[in-house]
Amino acid sequence: NYAKSMNELAIFYRDEQYGLQKDLAKTLALFQKAGKLGYADAYHNAGTLYRDGDGVERDLGQARYYFELGAIAGSMDARHNLACLDMDIGHFSRGHKHFLICTKGGFEPSLGGLRSGFEYGDITKHEYTQALTAFQKQRAETMSATRDEALRLTANLSKYRKNT
């Protein structure tokens, strides 16, 4: 019952990795169980299955449901995709507010949505400034020479694995 491992196993089934046969029903069930056990990104992953119609009938209502569960549990990916769904259906103010929350949490993909929210007046100058300041602080806290070296080594290891 280790939620993160369940999520990874679901991805292996979805992507046919490590000799596993594609099994999208099992994938969805594992994402759901991992989410219930507290792994927020598993809900995001379930939502993407429904958004993309990957192994299930495409259903934006179900996608929204899982993105909302993920966002409530703390997944920035889920909240960002929830913002994108809102934008797609014309709920710009709500979408921009989700981008605002993501940016404050240091989620770089949401910066463009934050900017558009400010330009369209859904986000005030004060909110915009606060979000950018929080974003920069978050980024500064996670940057370090040790982290950069670890990322470099990980990238080299990935290249090595692909070549062997």
Image (spheres, rainbow, N blue to C red):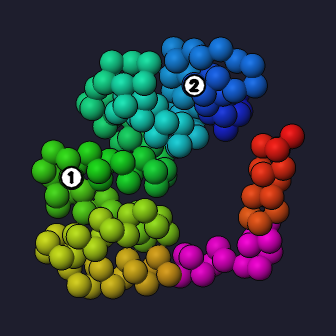
Residue 49 seen in render: yes
Q: Mark 2 and 1 residues: CB-CB less than 8 Å, in contact?
A: no
Q: In the rendering, at what x and y percent does residue 114 appear?
A: 30, 70
Q: Nearer the viewer, mark 2 or mark 1?
A: 2
> Would you name the residue on which mark 2 appears?
14
- Residue 152 figure quarter: bottom right
Q: Amino acid at mark 2?
A: Arg
- Between the residue at mark 2 and the residue at mark 1, the CA separation in whole angstroms equals 28 Å
State which tag comes first along the sequence, 2 or 1.
2
Residue that numbered label 1 is attached to: 87
**Closer-to-camera residue (51/159):** 159
Neighbours of disc 1 within 10 Å: few (<14), some (14-19), many (20+): some
SS type, badge 2: helix
Q: Which residues are magenta?
A: 137-150
Per the rendering, the mark at residue 121 is none
Find out whether residue 146 is within the magenta segment: yes
- At 36% from the left and 48% from the top, the residue drawn is 81
Q: Position of residue 75 (x, y in %)?
A: 49, 50
> Which residue sits at x=26%, y=85%?
126
As drawn, 63 above or below 134: above
